[in-house]
Image (spheres, rainbow, N blue to C red):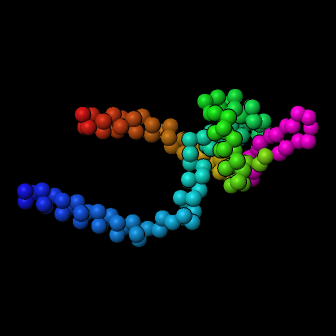
Amino acid sequence: MFYTYLKETNIENQLVMIKNKVEKFPIHEDCPVRNVFDRFGDKWSVLILIALDTVPQMRFNELHKGIDIISQKMLTVTLKTLEADGLVKRTMFPQIPPRVEYALTERGKSLIPHIHNLVAWSKEHMSDIQASRAAYNKQLV
């Protein structure tokens, strides 16, 4: 019983310490890192940016075929988000049928080297990360 009390008190103390540390670190809506990572750190944005870096101008259907596991709705939503952030430019050509092409903006192009660095880091460390995950999962069993 006394052990349970100590254990609960210790957990409560740790939670208070964590809360105090977190309050010192500003994680607000206007935090630039959080704001940017929330927008392009999703499942699809990086793939779209890499696709547009590979082929400088692509139509919607070309993008959809290139990233064949994305739904049309998710591609539309992600392209709008990237456009809103000024990473992707949408150009509509007045013809019948209407033609729309997507391309990286200068801001989007400036992000590409950082994405490539992240890809390189991921490739370099993936086997170690997988080994760590496997070891961690063994501990849980």
Q: Percent x, y for residue 118?
A: 54, 45
Image quarter of residue 86: bottom right
Q: Percent x, y for residue 112?
A: 65, 47
Residue 93 colored magenta?
yes
Name the residue rendered at 22%, 60% in the picture.
11
Please state, as top left, top right, bottom left or bottom right, where the N terminus lies in the image.
bottom left
Q: Height in image: 78 above or below 106?
A: above
Q: Height in image: 17 above or below 103?
A: below
* Residue 36 appears left or right of 18: right
Q: Percent x, y for residue 35?
A: 57, 59
* Residue 79 appears left or right of 115: right
Image quarter of residue 85: bottom right
Which residue is nearer to you in this view: 138 or 30? 30
Which residue is nearer to you in this view: 47 or 120? 47
Q: Is residue 137 visible?
A: yes
Q: Height in image: 65 above or below 78?
A: above
Name the residue rendered at 85%, 44% in the picture.
92
Q: Is residue 49 visible?
A: no
Image quarter of residue 47: top right
Please state, as top left, top right, bottom left or bottom right, where the C terminus lies in the image.
top left
Which residue is nearer to you in this view: 80 or 137? 80
Residue 18 colored magenta?
no
* Residue 1 appears left or right of 15: left
Name the residue rendered at 25%, 37% in the picture.
139
Name the residue rendered at 71%, 34% in the picture.
63
**How many numbered marks are there?**
0
Q: Residue lying furthest right in this view?
A: 95
Magenta stretch bounds: 91-108
Q: Residue lying furthest left in this view?
A: 1
